[in-house]
C-alpha cells in the first residue's frame, strides 16, 4: 500500500475487493439460511409467532395479490382473444390464459408483488428493530433472535407465498372467464373444456407451485439478510429496503429462467 | 389476547381461501380429476407417421375423450412410431378390430387419435396392439400430391 | 473502599473495531452488590464494554469472568443461561414496539417460565409498581416519553429477578426530574433487590450521587478507579478535567493535530 498504485492497479484492486465483498456476502447469506433451517423446528412449535407472521406477510398481501391476479387474467385473455380470433381459435383463450398464469405469470408476478409488499416490510422492520436495539435486547433477555424473529418470518414467507400465488392464479382464471365468456362471448363450455384438456396437473400446476416455493425462499432470505445487515440508521434501513426489492426482483427473474428451462424443456 | 384471536381468524380464512383456490384449479382448470382416480388399461399401435401428435393428446371415440396418449417411441424392429395409450376402464368393450387414425381438430388445432370401432365380438384387452392405423395427414405431402396431379393434368 | 466479593472480572481485555483500538489491555473487577460506574467521554466504547461483558461481542484477546465463568469460552446455550441472570437497560429502552407496556414486561416471564397467567399478571404489576408506571400498562411504546420507556425497560430488566443489571447511559437526554427519578430507582432497586449494578455513563453529577465505585476509561485505557472520594481528591490530570467538566486539559480543546499556522496555508 505504501507504493503509489497505477490506475490499472487501483481498478483491478477495486474489482477484486468488490468481488471478495460480494463473495463474503453470499457466504453470510448462506450461513443465515443454514441457521434458519436449523431453527425451523423451533419456529414450527411457536404457533403464535408463526400465525402473526402469516397474518403480516400473507393476509396483508391479499388485497394487492387478488386485485393484480384478477387484472392480469383479464388482460391476458383480452390480448389472447384478439390474436386467437384471427385464427378462429378463440376457444383456446381459456387454456392460453390458464397456462400462462400457472406456468409463468402467477409465480413471477406474485413473487414480485410479494417482494415489494412483504419482503420490503420485513427488511425495514428488522433493520429498525436492530437500530432501536430491540434485537440486542432480545439477546440480553436470553432469547435467540434467530428463533424468535427471523425463523418465524422465513417460515411464514414459505407458507404464504405459494398460497398467495394459488389464489392469484385462481382469480386470474376467473378474470379471464369474465372477459372472454361474459364480455366477448366465447362459449363457456369450450372455454373450460379446452382448459382442462390442455392444463396438466403435474406438468403445469405442480411445477408452478415448485417455482413459487423457490421464489418464497429467495425473497425471504434476501429480505432477512438485508434487514440483518442493514446499517442501523434511517438511511441504511431505507437503502436496505430498496436492495431487498431490487435483488429479489432480479433473483426471481433469473431463477424463473433457470427453473423454466429445467421444467418445460 | 383479543388481537391474537383476530389474527387466528384471519389466518384461518386465508388458508381456507387458498384451499378453495387450489380446489378450483385442480378440478375446474387442470386435468387433476382424470389423473388418479379412474383406472385405465393400456394399448399400443404402430403408425407410419404420427405428424405432430404429442404425449397427453386425447384419444377420442365419436368425438368423446376416452383416453390419452401416454408415450411415443420408435419401434426398433419396424422403424415405425409406436404410440402407447391409456384408455379409461369404463370403455372396456371396444372391439379388437377397431382402427385408429391421427386427426386434427380444426385447421390449425392440435392433433388427436380417433378410434373407429370395428365389428368383432372379441374386445380389446390390456396390452393389446391395434393393427389397423392410418397415419396423420401431412400438409406438405398433400400439397405435393396436389401439385403433381396439377402438372399431370396439364 | 472495603474489600467486597468480586462478581465480574475483566482481565487484559483488548478489542478493536477495524483499525481503531477501542480497548487496550483493560483489567478491572466489579464488586458484588454495589453500584459500579464506568465513565468516559462519548465514543470511548462504554456500551461496547457492556456488550463484551454480556458476551454479545467477542474480544480480540483477554477474558471476562462472571462468577468465575469464562464468558467467551461458553457455548451459546450456556451464554443464554447466564444472561437470564442479567438485566440490561438500553439507551433507547429497546422495548418491543409491537407489544404494549404490560406485555413487554411480561415478555421475559412468558418466554422463560411456564407460570400461569394470573401469577404473571401479579408479577408484572409488582415490577411496574416498582418503577411507578402501573397506570401505563395498556400504553404502547410509541405513546411513552423517553424517560417512561426507560422505566418500563427497567421493569422488564428486573422481571426475572436478575443478579446483575447493566445500565447503558441511563441519563442521556433526560430532563432533571426524570434523571432524579432514575437515580432514585437505580439506588432503591440495587439496595432492595441486592443487585449488582453496572452503570455506563458520562453524567458526572448523577453518577457521583449513586456510584459506590467508579472506573474512568479514556482512549482505550483504564485511567482511574476507586470510590468517588478517592477520585474527587485528584486535582490534576484527566480525571480532574473529566469530573469537573473543564474544556481544556489533558484532552485538548482542538481536535486537529497540525499547528494552526500550518493549516492556514492554503492549498
Image: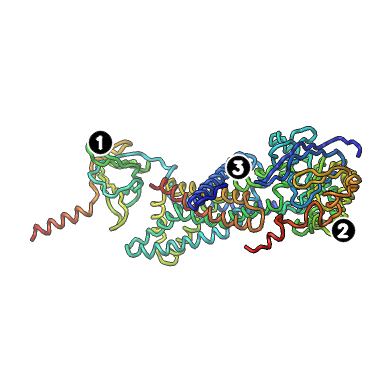
Q: Is residue B127 left or right of residue C49?
A: left
Residue of label 3: A36
The disc placed on residue C177 is 2
Q: Would you say residue B11 is visible in this rendering?
A: no
The one nearer the camera, C217 or B57, is C217
The disc placed on residue B76 is 1
Which of the 4 image quadrants contains residue B117?
top left
Identified at 19% across, 54% down, the residue is B142
Which of the 4 image quadrants contains residue C164?
top right
Identify the secondary structure beneath mark 1: loop
Identify the secondary structure beneath mark 2: helix
**Quadrant assignment for the C terminus of chain C:** bottom right
| Label 2, label 1: how far apart the Cα atoms are | 96 Å
Q: Outermost residue, top direction? A: C68
The one nearer the camera, A23 or C123, is A23
| Label 2, label 3: how far apart the Cα atoms are | 45 Å
The one nearer the camera, A198 or C242, is C242
Percent coordinates x, y for residue C58 in the rendering: 69, 40
- All told, the count of numbered labels is 3
Output the chain of dot 3: A
Identified at 51% across, 55% down, the residue is A249
The residue mark sitting in front, 3 or 1, is 3
Percent coordinates x, y for residue C127 in the rendering: 84, 48
Amino acid at each position: 500500500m505504501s507504493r503509489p498504485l497505477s490506475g490499472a492497479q487501483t481498478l483491478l484492486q477495486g474489482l477484486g475487493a468488490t468481488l471478495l465483498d460480494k463473495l463474503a456476502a453470499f457466504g453470510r447469506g448462506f450461513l443465515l439460511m443454514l441457521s434458519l433451517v436449523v431453527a425451523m423446528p423451533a419456529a414450527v412449535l411457536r404457533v403464535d409467532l408463526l400465525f402473526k407472521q402469516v397474518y403480516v406477510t400473507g393476509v396483508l398481501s391479499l388485497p394487492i395479490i387478488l386485485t393484480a391476479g384478477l387484472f392480469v387474467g383479464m388482460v391476458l385473455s383480452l390480448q389472447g382473444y384478439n390474436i386467437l380470433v384471427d385464427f378462429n381459435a378463440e376457444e383456446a383463450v381459456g387454456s392460453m390464459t390458464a397456462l400462462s398464469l400457472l406456468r409463468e405469470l402467477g409465480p413471477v408476478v406474485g413473487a414480485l408483488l410479494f417482494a415489494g409488499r412483504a419482503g420490503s416490510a420485513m427488511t425495514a422492520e428488522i433493520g429498525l428493530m436492530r437500530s432501536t436495539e430491540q434485537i440486542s435486547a432480545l439477546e440480553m433477555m436470553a432469547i435467540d433472535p434467530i428463533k424468535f424473529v427471523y425463523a418465524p418470518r422465513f417460515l411464514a414467507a414459505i407458507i404464504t407465498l405459494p398460497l398467495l400465488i394459488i389464489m392469484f392464479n385462481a382469480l386470474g382464471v376467473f378474470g379471464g372467464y369474465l372477459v372472454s365468456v361474459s364480455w366477448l362471448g366465447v362459449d363457456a363450455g369450450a372455454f373450460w373444456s379446452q382448459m382442462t384438456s390442455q392444463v396438466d396437473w403435474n406438468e403445469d400446476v405442480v411445477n408452478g407451485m415448485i417455482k413459487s416455493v423457490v421464489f418464497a425462499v429467495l425473497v425471504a432470505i434476501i429480505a432477512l439478510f438485508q434487514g440483518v445487515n442493514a446499517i442501523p440508521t434511517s438511511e441504511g434501513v431505507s437503502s436496505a429496503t430498496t436492495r431487498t426489492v431490487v435483488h429479489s426482483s432480479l433473483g426471481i427473474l433469473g431463477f424463473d429462467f433457470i427453473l423454466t428451462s429445467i421444467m418445460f424443456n | 389476547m383479543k388481537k391474537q384471536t383476530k389474527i387466528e381468524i384471519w389466518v384461518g380464512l386465508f388458508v381456507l381461501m387458498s384451499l378453495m383456490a387450489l380446489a378450483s384449479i385442480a378440478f375446474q382448470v387442470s386435468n387433476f380429476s382424470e389423473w388418479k382416480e379412474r383406472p385405465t388399461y393400456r394399448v399400443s399401435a404402430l403408425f407410419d407417421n404420427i405428424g405432430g401428435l404429442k404425449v397427453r393428446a386425447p384419444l377420442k371415440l365419436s368425438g368423446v375423450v376416452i383416453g390419452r396418449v401416454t408415450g411415443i417411441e420408435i419401434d426398433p424392429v419396424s422403424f415405425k412410431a409406436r404410440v402407447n395409450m391409456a384408455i379409461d376402464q369404463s370403455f372396456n368393450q371396444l372391439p379388437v378390430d377397431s382402427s385408429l387414425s391421427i386427426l386434427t381438430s380444426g385447421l390449425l388445432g392440435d392433433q388427436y387419435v380417433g378410434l373407429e370401432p370395428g365389428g368383432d365380438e372379441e374386445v380389446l384387452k390390456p396390452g393389446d396392439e391395434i393393427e389397423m392405423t392410418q397415419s396423420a395427414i401431412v400438409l406438405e405431402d398433400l400439397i405435393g400430391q396436389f401439385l403433381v396431379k396439377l402438372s399431370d393434368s396439364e | 473502599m472495603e474489600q467486597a466479593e468480586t462478581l465480574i472480572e475483566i482481565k487484559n481485555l483488548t478489542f478493536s473495531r477495524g483499525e481503531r483500538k477501542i480497548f487496550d489491555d483493560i483489567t478491572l473487577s466489579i464488586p458484588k452488590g454495589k453500584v459500579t460506574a464506568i465513565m468516559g467521554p462519548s465514543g470511548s466504547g462504554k456500551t461496547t464494554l457492556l456488550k463484551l461483558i454480556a458476551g454479545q461481542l467477542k474480544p480480540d484477546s483477554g477474558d471476562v469472568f462472571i462468577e468465575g465463568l469464562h464468558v467467551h469460552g461458553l457455548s451459546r446455550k450456556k451464554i443464554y443461561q447466564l444472561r437470564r441472570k442479567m438485566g440490561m437497560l438500553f439507551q433507547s429502552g429497546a422495548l418491543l414496539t409491537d407489544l404494549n407496556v404490560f406485555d413487554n414486561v411480561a415478555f421475559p416471564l412468558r418466554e422463560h417460565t411456564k407460570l400461569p397467567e394470573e401469577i404473571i399478571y401479579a408479577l408484572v404489576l409488582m415490577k411496574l409498581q416498582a418503577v411507578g408506571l402501573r397506570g401505563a400498562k395498556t400504553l404502547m411504546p410509541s405513546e411513552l416519553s423517553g424517560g417512561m420507556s426507560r422505566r418500563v425497560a427497567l421493569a422488564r430488566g428486573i422481571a426475572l429477578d436478575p443478579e446483575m443489571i447493566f445500565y447503558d447511559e441511563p441519563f442521556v437526554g433526560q430532563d432533571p426530574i426524570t434523571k432524579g427519578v432514575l437515580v432514585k430507582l437505580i439506588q432503591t432497586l440495587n439496595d432492595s433487590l441486592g443487585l449488582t449494578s453496572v452503570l455506563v455513563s458520562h453524567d458526572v453529577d448523577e453518577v457521583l450521587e449513586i456510584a459506590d465505585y467508579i472506573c474512568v476509561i479514556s482512549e482505550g485505557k483504564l485511567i482511574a478507579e476507586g470510590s468517588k472520594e478517592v477520585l474527587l481528591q485528584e486535582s490534576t490530570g484527566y480525571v480532574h478535567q473529566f469530573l469537573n467538566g473543564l474544556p481544556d486539559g489533558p484532552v485538548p480543546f482542538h481536535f486537529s493535530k497540525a499547528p494552526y499556522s500550518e493549516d492556514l496555508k492554503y492549498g
